[in-house]
Image: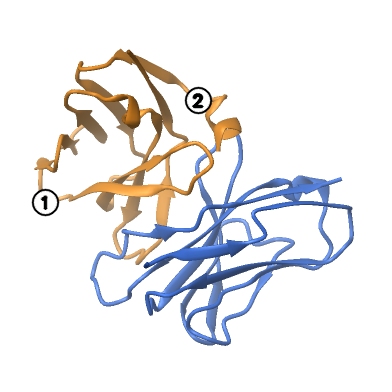
Chain colours: A blue, B orange
Amino acid sequence: EAQVTQNPRYLITVTGKKLTVTCSQNMNHEYMSWYRQDPGLGLRQIYYSMNVEVTDKGDVPEGYKVSRKEKRNFPLILESPSPNQTSLYFCASTPARTAYGGELFFGEGSRLTVL
Amino acid sequence: GESVGLHLPTLSVQEGDNSIINCAYSNSASDYFIWYKQESGKGPQFIIDIRSNMDKRQGQRVTVLLNKTVKHLSLQIAATQPGDSAVYFCAERVRGGYNKLIFGAGTRLAVHP
């Protein structure tokens, strides 16, 4: 089954404790992206990657890091989480071959709470 | 998830009625638009898209209308069903912004039997 898989789905952590949210897709998509979703706001892009070893900042990159060592994986790293990073996080992917790359395939989401 | 929908405008409809969800987009340079559906506890799912050189596009039970003059997008759902209950987002892509989508805050659709 074609899918984007995120782990963990739920996490409660404390300020300053490094954590990684993994994202893996089995569709051989070149493009991957991370979003956060907060109440009353639309999805906001954190980082994206056009292909292996190519990453770039989105609209809200502060406090986050990413890496793209393999095509299928795009982990989101919070080196020193803070309470304002409490949010619902989504990973998404799409093939790069289409001129309009908007049809993103989303994971199920990772709800992160930072105390 | 559900907590995201609590702060959103809500459209309540009766099962079987038609639903119209509206979206105002921000950038006149946007050339591609998408509607996503997000059910409680799940990630957004693609519903339908439309390019700026079109005014209307139809899918199965859904129609998207684009009015570039007033920068307005709408999603029409025919014969709304309980399974249509979800948060609906529109997204726009600014010309030249490959895969850079700007998402609206969303509208919650509640379908009552």
Identify the mark at residue B8; answer none if there is no mark. Answer: 2
Out of B113 and B60, give the one closest to the viewer. Answer: B113
Which x, y percent locates residue A38? 61, 40
Identify the mark at residue B53; answer none if there is no mark. Answer: 1
- Secondary structure, mark 1, is loop
Out of A97 and B92, give the one closest to the viewer. Answer: A97
In terms of image quadrants, where is residue B7?
top right
Residue name at image x 42 percent, y 47 percent: B44
Identify the mark at residue B102; answer none if there is no mark. Answer: none
Q: Are marks 2 and 1 on the same chain?
A: yes
Chain designation of label 2: B
Q: Residues within 10 Å of mark 2 (few under 14, many from 20)?
A: some
Residues at badges 2 and 1 in contact (C-beta under 8 Å)?
A: no
In front: mark 2 or mark 1?
Answer: 2
Tell me which amino acid carries mark 1: Asn
Residue name at image x 43 percent, y 45 percent: B103
Tell me which amino acid carries mark 2: Leu
Chain designation of label 1: B
- Secondary structure, mark 2, is loop
Q: Is residue A72 above or below residue B27?
A: below
Residue name at image x 33 percent, y 73 percent: A95
Residue B68, can we see it? Answer: yes
Residue name at image x 32 percent, y 30 percent: B84
Which x, y percent locates residue A94? 36, 68
Q: Which quarter of the rendering shows the C terminus of chain A?
A: top right
Which x, y percent locates residue B8? 50, 25
Q: Earlier in the sequence, mark 2 or mark 1?
A: 2
Q: Is residue A41 left or right of residue B30?
A: right
Q: Is residue B35 left or right of residue B86?
A: left
